[in-house]
Image (cartoon, rainbow, N blue to C red):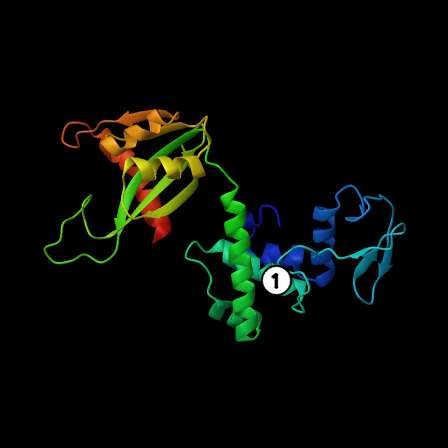
Amino acid sequence: MAQQGNLTLMEFMEQYGTEEQCREHLYQIRWPAGFVCPKCGAKDEPYQIKSHKRFQCRHCTHQTTVTAGTVMDKSRTPLVKWFLAIYLMGQDKRGCSALKLKRELGIACDTAWTMSHKIRKAMKDRDAGYLLSGTVDVDDSFFGATRTGGKRGRGTEKTAVVFGVSFDRKGRPEYLKAKVAEAVDGEMLTAFAKENIDPTARLRSDGLSAYRKLGQSGFIHEPQHFDHKENPEHLKWRECSQIGTNVLY
């Protein structure tokens, strides 16, 4: 479902509103140049076992399906509902609960929970393999209820979250990665960068001493030293923090 995020619900249903449309889409993704047996590698038109929606290799008789190895593998739930569940979960930044899937798709509670769990894991696994690149702003923020008389900002008892935001050549935000941190220190920031940011990226951060570890670890690091009273650019830098806050909330 490439570029599904750009489709309205009506457009999505026009493209993936039938089982045949969904199955054909999966076939084209799996075998864009024609069927290839996953076992013996033979490239030949397979036998189609329509009663079981399977393809059988003409050479080694191995059988496979368009959903093999996916979250939809061996599921009795129609592909149309799987596709719509993926669309709904990918559209809302706040997520889509199993209860909402149950209502929208007309499925049982345990089915909705299983589907949402599998889809979330697939999204997480895919995101884990992507590294932020180009210009990347790294910042930290704190989330949680405010305690009366408690300290604000760094040093607060709220939950710390570190995030990186990559920007395109026109300075527009593209991708974000975030991680909950027990403490915002050099060791944690370096580990976050190595796990989520391309080594060739240009990193920007504020002047907190903990961020100096990024440059010492081999990253191209450009700390920004701001005085919010003298330099209004400080407000532009905080755009990174605002983006993270909007996404996480």
Where is the C terminus found, in terms of image quarters? bottom left
Number of marks in picture? 1
Q: Position of residue 87 (x, y in %)?
A: 55, 57
Query: Which residue is disc 1 drawn over?
Result: 82
Of the pair 61 and 101, the residue shown nearer to us: 61
Q: Amino acid at mark 1?
A: Trp
Front residue of 22 and 15: 22
Say what secondary structure mark 1 lies in: helix
In the rendered image, which quarter is residue 11 located in?
bottom right
Of residues 159 and 23, the one nearer the viewer is 159
Q: Tell me if I can see residue 174 in this picture.
A: no
Q: Does residue 6 appear to the left or right of 241 in the view shown?
A: right
Q: Is residue 210 left or right of residue 230?
A: right
Tell me if 53 is positioned left or right of 129 in this view.
right
Residue 3 seen in this snapshot: yes
Where residue 73 appears, x then y in whole percent?
A: 67, 60
Query: Residue drawn 64% across and 55% down?
Result: 70
